[in-house]
Image: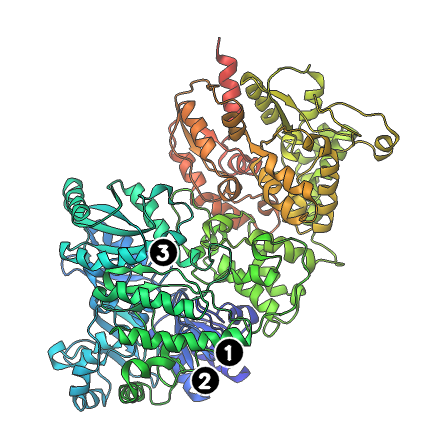
Amino acid sequence: MTDLQADLHKAVRGEVGFDVTSRALTTMDASNYRRVPLGVVAPRDADDVAAVLEVCRSHGVPVVPRGGGTSIAGQATGTGVVLDFTRHMDRVLSLDPEARTAVVQPGLVLDRLQEAAAPHGLRFGPDPSTHSRCTLGGMIGNNSCGSHSVAWGTTADSVRELDVVTARGQRLRLGQEWAGAPAGLRELAEGELARLRTGFPELPRRISGYALDALLPENRADVARSFCGSEGTLGVLTEAVVRLVESPRARALAVLGYADEGAAAEAAAGLLVHRPLTVEGMAADLVPSAAALPRGGAWLFVETGADSEAEARARAEEIVRAADVLDALVVTDPAGQRALWRIREDASGTATRMPDGTEAWPGWEDCAVPPRRLGAYLRDFRRLLGSHGLRGTPYGHFGDGCIHVRIDFDLLTQAGIGRFRRFSEELADLVVAHGGSLSGEHGDGQARAELLPRMYGDEMVALFERAKAVWDPDDLLNPGTLVRPAPLDSNLRFAVLPREPVDVAFGYPADGGDFPAAVRRCVGVAKCRTTSVSGPAVMCPSFRATGEEAHSTRGRARLLHEMLAGELVTEGWRSEEVRDALDLCLSCKGCRSDCPVGVDMATYKAEFLHHHYAGRRRPAAHHSMGRLPEWLRRVDRLRVAPLVNALAALRPSAAVAKRLGGIAPERRIPRVAAETFSRWWGRRSARGTGELVVLWPDTFTEHLSPSVGQSAVRVLEAAGLRVALPPTVHLAKAPVGDGRTVALDPVSLLRGRGRVCCGLTYVSTGQLDRARTVLGRTLDLMAPVLETRAPVVVLEPSCAAALRTDLPELLHDDPRAALLASRVLTFAEALERLAPSWRPPALNRPVVGQTHCHQHAVLGDTADRRLREAAGLTGELTGGCCGLAGNFGFEKGHFEVSEACAEERLLPSVRRAPEDAVVLADGFSCRTQLEQLAGVRGRHLAEVLAEALEREP
């Protein structure tokens, strides 16, 4: 391997990665399979591709072209050298609006092509649900389709010419009339004309095998089309000329409700006469909440297009009238349509969990049958599932007869794997009996290629092998895929994971306490690799800042998988590769909500750091910022806040402090409040006689932004609520009144005074033993509160999120933890639930700012939106992450990424805001980032409302 690596370094201008991280990131795609490559090369151009092929051929090492790594059949994995086109060969080279064509490179993400075509009223027709991260090269390799295939066909229908390099270095320009055909291909096809005319089923989604029938004279001997769907086994694509279609100026979405998926499937084919753009189907099993959908147990998403909204709606309503439905909904608002489409697009992830939480897997992800047979096929499919004791929820492209399904295979035991094989063989026979194709979109890969003889017969499969030999006589390109395939039950990615429980600190309740099961959640759909986000989405800010796979949620999950496997990443919890990948994780928790399968990388990072540094010296930042509550309490106890602020303002002393504390030199140390929130509280007399709420004095509100707490008290009391603070001593019993009650019993006196703490800073730095101790003391302090029914109002979103999730997951053995978590309310939730008749003062101003990432991911912001609306605060807050994210943006080495995250959405939105806009930022980190990078003062919603109350007569 050393000689191969050295030769590649000499021959290639792009990056050559034979390190553990590069290899670990490409062991898997979105399938059930895992193969460890020797190395990864990111070529800069076609010359680099040719050089890689020459070197690998001389060493007898296979080559695997890879796009976005979202393939579901295993064809983007391999044991040789993986070509990663997403780093350099990822551009739109030209676009001709008149000819309606574009010249693209294989690593180009589909959404980037759509953005380039949109100003001309054009688009690329096929659009898989992974459109925000799948690449054109991968789409051509798999002959991908997407939801609009009933109108615009497959990728092969959109390809005009292809530039490829063969395994032996020949550069070909593929097109029609035998253009670019390698020597021997024409002779092979012309010698098998009868077989090519009769051996392929007629259906819109026949993707399995090689498309050799495209070489027939009546099909204009289209070599480019025949290359589509070859899964990287015939040649390496370096450039493509693709066709674009006219994008409708207006669209309407008709959502048709049916009793069940069978009824929806029966209806789908009958709608095609209306020439819709989509006919997508899904059942209630895949919908987290059907509130936004019409009545029914299954739905068809039927989109229509026209030159005007009225015409598009009229076409949609015509389809509703023609369809035999329980209920229907027609949406023309683009935002409403996007929200509905997200339900459908996320199905590839949500389908990986059954309603009871059981894992479900691909393998039979996209069979296709003639649309008119879809209903009958689904009934037979359900019977076959039941006969094997399996469950799955079909969904997909009903108008094309293409069904996606994840099935609860047991791929961890030999008995389960045996059932997986038997079911696969029987299902292949069932698909063929209905005149279908084993693959209708994602290719055969390792998942289905072994079964191709059942669909095509041995003689046609032998013809596929002869075609492969014409293109690639040395079997260099992606061997084991399509022809002479590896068995469908080999190379399973779960086989290498430990069978014994892994000792961990968190409870992982959604995964039965099993850390490997939590890591297995990542199935590789790669929504975290989306390069731009809209609306409230957050995941994954570090990937968008660096563009590196290692900094995506998927990349980190892959490294954790390999850490557990112990074959490639061999140091376990001590792994520096895993540590380095997690270093730029902001712990924003965006993946917890935005990932379709709920991967929670912030928790995994905390778990890893806990083990990685056990018994070892920790980074300085873990002590300076991880133990921030302790330092600030000492400053308060010694009454030295003015001195600390003075030293922080002096450049020499601040520089020393930052160097010792592991703080980025670009950062300014925030000022400590001269008077804490609790001291202010102690000076005022108790007020209010209404319902009791306990206001949580989080570290940031207490020591750094006491004005937020003061404002919250004013607003809560104005709303008729009685405010108390948590006890500061261990009370022998209730009552909980003003939070200052002291029970003079000996135990209380011995324990001394304390402060509640959510443990956030300890958790984010992986100091989980310390976090458990702090949280245990907090629960002791809160014991009398928990004996009441008083809710706990938390002003800092990150602290509220920690109490809602980290607390019960870390102290999963203490029932008080779940009880306290259930009591936590945000500021807006408290007003909405406890003072529903109260109306805030009218501000009537626009707002700008960012929804806190933890609020988006854990708490939700529905109550905040309603409160802002009631106060006349108009406009939407951006999504994304501010980039400071607690200790992250302050740590040395993180400043550039932190700034890049802020510049993505938050700072531009503030710069564009009108002069009278209110800049909202409920999180201390968000406010600090705004102040330090933009010189703008952001305010908590409580501060804005309190100020307005003071102005009222």
How are the colours assigned in the image? rainbow
Task: Name the residue furthest top.
Answer: 953
Q: In terms of image quadrants, where is residue 50? A: bottom left
- Residue 460: where, in percent of width, then height? 26, 86
Q: Residues within 10 Å of mark 1 (few under 14, many from 20)?
A: many
* Left or right, 593 with reference to 614: left
* Left or right, 414 with reference to 303: right
Type of amino acid under label 1: Leu
- Residue 430: where, in percent of width, then height? 32, 74
Type of amino acid under label 3: Ser
Circle on res. 61: 2
Choose the circle earlier in sequence order: 2 or 1: 1
Residue identified by numbered label 3 = 132
Q: Are marks 1 and 3 in contact (CB under 8 Å)?
A: no
Q: Please, what secondary structure does the residue beneath circle 1 have?
A: loop
**Distance from Cα at disc 2 to Cα at disc 1:** 9 Å
- Residue 706: where, in percent of width, then height? 63, 26
**Distance from Cα at disc 1 to Cα at disc 3:** 29 Å
Residue identified by numbered label 1 = 38
Front-lying residue, 421 or 467: 421
- Res. 951 visible in picture: yes
**Distance from Cα at disc 3 to Cα at disc 2:** 32 Å
Type of amino acid under label 2: Val
Q: Residues within 10 Å of mark 3 (few under 14, many from 20)?
A: many
- Res. 660 visible in picture: no
Note whether 940 is above or below 799 in the view shown: above
Q: Are marks 2 and 1 in contact (CB under 8 Å)?
A: yes
Choose the circle earlier in sequence order: 1 or 3: 1
How many numbered callouts? 3
